[in-house]
Amino acid sequence: MNKIDITVGVDIGGTNTAIGFVDRDGKCHLEDAITTNGKEEAVKFFSRLHEKIDNMYTELSEGFLLKGIGIGAPNANYLKGTIEYPPNLNWGYINVVEIMREYYTIPLAITNDANAAAIGEMKFGAAKGMKDFIVITLGTGLGSGIVVNGELVYGADGFAGEIGHTIYDPCGRECGCGRKGCLETYASASGIRRTVLELLKNSKEESELRNISIDQITSKKIFVAAVKGDKIALEAFEYTGKVLGTKLADSVAYTSPEAIILFGGLARAGDLIFKPVKYYMEQNLLDIFKNKVKIIPSGLPEGNSAVLGASALIWNELDKLFAA
Amino acid sequence: MNKIDITVGVDIGGTNTAIGFVDRDGKCHLEDAITTNGKEEAVKFFSRLHEKIDNMYTELSEGFLLKGIGIGAPNANYLKGTIEYPPNLNWGYINVVEIMREYYTIPLAITNDANAAAIGEMKFGAAKGMKDFIVITLGTGLGSGIVVNGELVYGADGFAGEIGHTIYDPCGRECGCGRKGCLETYASASGIRRTVLELLKNSKEESELRNISIDQITSKKIFVAAVKGDKIALEAFEYTGKVLGTKLADSVAYTSPEAIILFGGLARAGDLIFKPVKYYMEQNLLDIFKNKVKIIPSGLPEGNSAVLGASALIWNELDKLFAA
């Protein structure tokens, strides 16, 4: 019997690391997770990861042939195979591909979460058949993966695609990066929370969000309030979409994508975020770009999109090897 | 005797069209020009262009073999072969490649001036051997050509690379595009002129520029004054460099280039513009990008850089044909 080619997609998060065995069509045959312990040494983590992958591969039955491993991780560098000083992980600068080479001879690749999401959309999701698009991941921060002519943009150093750290307002909100007014301080889960706090402070409008202690206000609770018609929550979504849409008009001027895909928690708020993003992007576009660029949601299943992205990364590499 | 392969580079400007026969090493063997008459029909213009190219080819001696024609023009679209509603030319929407196909069977390509400049730098100039860089052309406006992984970024519609129309200040100067605060309203020959007018209005500083009628103030005269130590002129260059440097920090976050090349009139002001651009770019860069990105001048000869760029465009196509 012919074995089915399979890859492993690994999504390294701050608290958990998800692992999935994904075939060429994006079907996940087995998924599991290990804890990411930020205080553990990197080599110990990757030893545990290797053990888990091996156990899962045994469990998977004999019908599959492992072809490669793709990893998505914060601060990962595709060109160097490294993870460099990830926030919340005490790993410093490590070469993941070298560490994993102790265990595997098959192709390995690593990139950051947003780039993995972009390749995931291209292989299995909303960007199938597209050659020029941008994926914006709206999580705690704002990540981005830019695809030009069918290839992910890595830049000279592997760190391209930091749209979350383009400047919306040079006198604006303090960012974790040490600068002011970065897009992600507005357009992200933490950004919309800051917007709500600002609105609560500046207005006298009634809002159910006033009854929640400040530390407990989350983007989810803002969404729930907005759905019920809470004016502060609605205004927060409108403002978030305005900031993001305005800056996406700049993004279009750079790479003129066919579509911009919104991915992650905030994007699941649907029209609440998509409508203002579309409106303000169009308002701010140069004439030649108007009514051309689609703003669409992710086409990856919610539960394991990150694992699918990491798997797509290595499928993409395998396709290139095959084409060469 | 083996003939030397040669291409024609054509630079269509608002008043003149330059034509050069350029070999694979970027040497221009013969150069001439025809007038661009904005009121003339496009087909008549291209008929005259064809005649001129043919006459020059005859003049060039028998030692050369014409392999292709590259054209740089305002509002040109590489993907479609068109020029679309160019300012100052009464041509509307025309398909240049189709028109030229009446006369030539050899490979033809067209792109806008800034993209041609970028390919020129890659083939013959300051970006030789680079795979990721950006060319900023500082003329009356601000044009840009973005190269990622060795390929020019055209985007889904062929119009990518409009960094001049990213927004510096949403409440800022009116732009010819109908919006406000576009980068090119600050960082360009016309932009620095507007800055000088603003400074003259707001300050009481002595300046030789006060003795020139407003319509006569040019970027050249501002440069001459700055070299002599005129404080208004110096401040105008500083401000221009600040705006450009600040926005280039965003550009780096998009494509993480190895270098940004400043091209065109204003760039010839040397340190007056390069120093503030470098300083403010570094000041505004995300930490991971600091001290990595070179800001360098064009490596193309001043006189015929546009013709070399247009020729480089078609050499690049010929190389791709050869590689395939």
Image (cartoon, coloured by chain):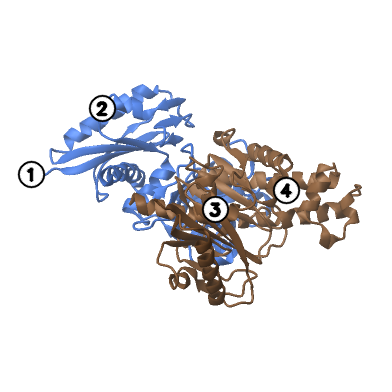
Chain colours: A blue, B brown
- In the picture of the structure, the residue carrying the numbered disc 2 is A51
Q: Secondary structure at mark 4?
A: helix
Label 2 marks a residue whose chain is A
Q: Nearer the viewer, mark 4 or mark 2?
A: 4
Asked if both marks, 4 and 1, belong to the same chain, the answer given is no
* Residue farthest to the left, as pictured: A1
- In the picture of the structure, the residue carrying the numbered disc 3 is B29
Mark 2 crowdedness (10 Å alpha carbons): few <14, some 14-19, many ≥20:
few
Asked if both marks, 4 and 2, belong to the same chain, the answer given is no
* Residue farthest to the front, as pictured: B1
Question: For the residues marked 2 and 1, what is the alpha-carbon distance in whole angstroms?
Answer: 27 Å
Give x and y (percent) for residue B316.
44, 52
- In the picture, the quarter occupied by the C terminus of chain A is top left
Give x and y (percent) for residue B179.
66, 63
- In the picture of the structure, the residue carrying the numbered disc 4 is B240
- In the picture of the structure, the residue carrying the numbered disc 1 is A1
Q: Secondary structure at mark 3?
A: strand
